[in-house]
Amino acid sequence: MPLSTDIKLKTLSYVIIYVPDTKEATSFYTEKLGFKVKRADDGWVEFESGPTTIALHASEEGMKQACEKTLTPTLVFKVDNIKEAFEALQSKGIKFCQEEPQEVCATTDHVGFSADFTDPFGNKLSIYGETKK
């Protein structure tokens, strides 16, 4: 018999990224990606990132506890103009996994493109933008 529950997951509240050094990671997220710090404590930093808070958590243990699998979450940031965002991040020293944004989806009125990169600690990040057909 299936288990029934009244709990409904509504929105993503936090994305916690485990890093060995929050100060170094904060520099990357503010200087390279343009986020503003909302709150910073010893070993914990939150960024202004809309309805979902992106937080850095200092923890070597947390990095090891990622279920010991090779799959890790990717944080995807929507951008207004994928080409401009790609070029702007490259100019700040971001090394992307591909030479150009790649088509990842299409509908009758738009095409979606993304480009993947990592932060200094190997956390997977991506930018995503749509162009009209």
Image: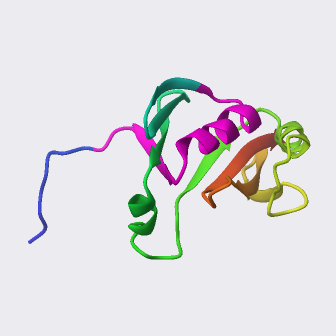
Residue 38 in the image: state x and y as whole percent.
51, 23
| Foreground residue among 50 and 19 | 19
The magenta region covers 9-36
Q: Is residue 114 magenta?
A: no
**Camera-side residue of 21 and 75:** 21
Split into 4 quadrants, where in the image is the N terminus? Answer: bottom left
Closer to us: 77 or 104 = 77
Q: Position of residue 112 (x, y in %)?
A: 75, 49
Q: Residue at x 84, y 54 (%)?
A: 101
Q: Is residue 109 something one can see in this rendering?
A: no
**Percent position of residue 49, x then y:** 56, 30
Residue 21 image point, x, y percent: 55, 48
Model colouring:
rainbow
Magenta stretch: includes residue 21: yes
Q: Is residue 118 visible?
A: yes
The residue furthest left is 1
Q: Is residue 102 above or below residue 54?
A: below
- Which image quadrant for residue 74? bottom right
